[in-house]
Amino acid sequence: MVYWASSDIKQAATQIALTLQLNPDLADAHLFAGNILLRGGKREDARTEFEAYLRLAPKGEFATQVKQILQK
């Protein structure tokens, strides 16, 4: 989150990839990865991460927003 807040997207992506390697079932990590990928213009990869978030947390705190993003 620190790297994201400081706009160091490359480092944020590195850290979230490591997080997902350690715990691929962490829904919030998939959400964060989707946001990083979307910001980097990788829409299809972001879609995959957002779908993983919804699969793991269908009623999660950000589920409604993620569904709206996917519809766009």
Image (cartoon, rainbow, N blue to C red):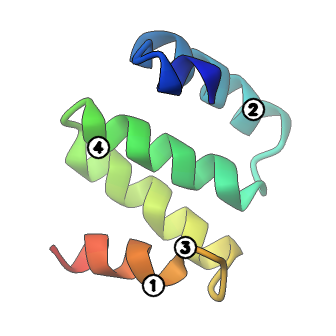
User: Could you say which is closer to the camera, residue 28 or residue 45?
Assistant: 28
Q: Earlier in the sequence, mark 3 or mark 4?
A: 4
- The residue labelled by disc 1 is 64
**In 3D space, how far apart are the residues under numbered discs 4 and 1 (Cα atoms)?**
17 Å
Spatial separation of the CA atoms under disc 3 and disc 4: 16 Å
Q: Which disc number belongs to residue 37?
A: none
Mark 3 to mark 1: distance in Å? 6 Å
Q: Nearer the viewer, mark 3 or mark 4?
A: 3
Regarding mark 4 in the picture, which secondary structure is present there? helix
Which of the two marks, 2 or 3, is nearer to us in this view? 3
Cβ–Cβ under 8 Å for marks 3 and 1: yes
Q: Which residue is mark 3?
A: 62
- Residue type at tag 1: Thr
- 21 vs 44, left or right, is right
Determine crowd level at label 2: few under 14, some 14-19, many 20+ residues with C-alpha closer than 10 A.
Answer: some
Residue in the image at 45% along x and 84% along y: 64
**Residue 19: numbered disc:** 2
Which image quadrant for residue 68? Answer: bottom left
Q: Pointers 4 and 1 in contact (CB under 8 A)? A: no
Circle 3/circle 4 CB separation < 8 Å: no
Dot 1 alpha-carbon crowd within 10 angstroms: few under 14, some 14 to 19, many 20 or more: few
